Structure formats: structure tokens, C-alpha cells
Image: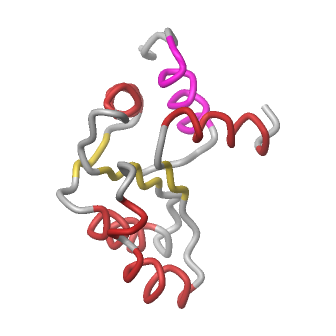
Amino acid sequence: MRAPVTGLADEVAERVVDSGFWPFYGTPCGILAPLFTAVDLRAGLLPVVREDNAVGLAAGAAPAGRAPVVLMQNSGPGQSVNALASLIVVYGLAMLFAEHAARFAAALRGSVPW
């Protein structure tokens, strides 16, 4: 049974999961809590204590044929600069990053044809 779509976080989670993204990694964050819950209900969320660790785990999923997603709080990109520059960029790994649910949804609506 699918979780009902009731709000923006649910809509974003539904579309991302339906587009084939998985696994989902993230550092617990109050701002992203609705999105974390919606993703966890649909596909499972693997909580990680640091954003750079989430990037590292996602980096392992990408060459295995997965389309990983890293959900970050606002300070996440700064915390992950080294992992991004020395791992993701160097090896050209693909993954989706979400820093804030509202910006994430706007980006999806503007770039993915549903």
C-alpha cells in the first residue's frame, strides 16, 4: 500500500521515489523532517550522523547502479565539501542532493518532466 500524498513533502517524496531514486541518506534535521518522514514511508531513509558520511555512503551506491539521494540540513554542503571535491567530483559520481524541501520541490518542478 502506498502512503497518501497530503502535502509538499509527500509530493516531492512520491515523485522522487517514482522516478527511480534510491537509496536515501540523511542527517536528521527539523526543517527537512516532513520530507524525511515522507521518504521513509515510501522507500526507507538511512539516517547518518554527518552529511559527509551520507555523501560517502551514496558514493558507494552510485557505482552499484543505484540513484542515491542525500538529504542535508542547511549547513550540509559546507560540511561535505571535502567529500564532494575529493570523491564525487573526481570520480564523476551521480547523485541527487536536497538541502531544503521548498527549494528541492521548485527545482524538481522546473527540471523534471512529469
Residue at the outermost left position: 49
* In the image, residue 67 above or below residue 104: below
Is residue 110 placed above or below 23 in the rendered structure?
above
Q: Which residues are magenta?
A: 7-18
Q: Quadrant of residue 81?
A: bottom left
Residue 63 on image: x %, y %: 49, 75
Q: What x and y, as percent, mark residue 10?
A: 49, 21
Q: Main secondary structure of the magenta part?
A: helix
Q: What residue do we see at 68% from left, 42% from top?
A: 107
| Colour mapping used in the image | secondary structure
Q: Does the magenta portion include 48?
A: no
| x 59%, y 82%: residue | 92
Residue 104, compared with residue 87, is above or below; it is above
Instruction: Identify which residue is drawn at 41% across, 31% down.
Output: 35
> Which quarter of the rendering shows the N terminus?
top left
Tell me where residue 93 appears, x and y as whole percent: 55, 76
